[in-house]
Image: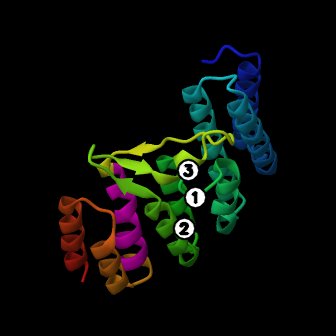
Amino acid sequence: MGTSAQGPDLWKQIDDAEHYLVSGLFERAISTTLSVSDQIHSTAVENSCDHDELLEMLELVGMVLVQAIKELKRTSEMFVQLKTVYGSVASIPLKIFITGAMMQMAEGSGSDLRPIFEEYLSKWRYTDDQVYVLNEVKNSSSNGVVVTSVMEPEQYFEVAELYTITLLSVVSRETEIAISWTGKAELTEQHRQVHFMLHCNDK
């Protein structure tokens, strides 16, 4: 927990947003989460709260947001709203990105997701330290962006699998595009071979 006066107030507003969600006040939940996210970014610029605490707040805000949007059957605007909260597609926390994408696919809006997935996956680079690093972080240290900048290979593979196997191969029936993407993707060689095997099994 942070020690600033603003920290407890932000947590109170997040509690309010969660209350609106479970009470069926979905529009109120959305407006509250967007307001809280603006305040979190301002707090990040001022360095008045711990980064990990702000990150935790933003993840909670995002989860309330995607659930409220789903309940309102407005999943087509899911990633527009998430970009408002996180600043960019690649800055969306992994759990929330996957949850939002699966909700959108379930509602039949999968056709809009291809550029979203490709933008997200293209912003991460595999390093000699055997982790993925978010390229955008080096340009965002002073503008209030609060983001997890490192991803484990298994986490990256999870997103890539959701994109190529679920969205492209199963939902869109575009297996050849999926295979082509896999061949050029920023995957470890082990994960690339697993992907190719999954595509072969899907045919």
Q: Residues within 10 Å of mark 2 (few under 14, many from 20)?
A: some
Tag 1–tag 2 contact (CB < 8 Å): yes
Kindly identify which residue carries mark 1: 89
Secondary structure under the numbered disc 3 in the rendered image: loop
Q: Nearer the viewer, residue 151 or 33?
A: 151
For the point 76% across and 41% down, which residue is it?
38
- Residue 160: x, y in percent? 37, 63
For the point 47% across and 59% down, which residue is it?
123
* Drawn side of residue 50 relative to residue 132, left or right: right
C-alpha gap between disc 1 and disc 2? 7 Å
- Where, quadrant-wise, is the N terminus in this rendering? top right
Secondary structure under the numbered disc 1 in the rendered image: loop
Q: Which quadrant holds residue 180?
A: bottom left
- Residue 76: x, y in percent? 66, 69
What label does residue 36 carry, if any? Answer: none
Q: Give the dominant element type of the magenta stretch: helix, strand or loop.
A: helix
What label does residue 91 carry, if any? Answer: 3
Task: Identify which amino acid the numbered label 1 is placed on.
Answer: Val
Query: In the image, which residues are magenta?
Result: 155-169
Tag 3–tag 1 contact (CB < 8 Å): yes
Kindly identify which residue carries mark 2: 116
C-alpha gap between disc 3 and disc 1? 5 Å
Vertical relation: 138 (above or below) 159: above
Task: Identify which amino acid the numbered label 3 is placed on.
Answer: Ser
17 within the magenta span: no
Q: Residues within 10 Å of mark 3 (few under 14, many from 20)?
A: many
- Residue 52: x, y in percent? 54, 28
Q: Nearer the viewer, residue 19 or 130?
A: 130
Nearer the N terminus, badge 3 or badge 2? 3
Task: Identify which amino acid the numbered label 2 is placed on.
Answer: Ile
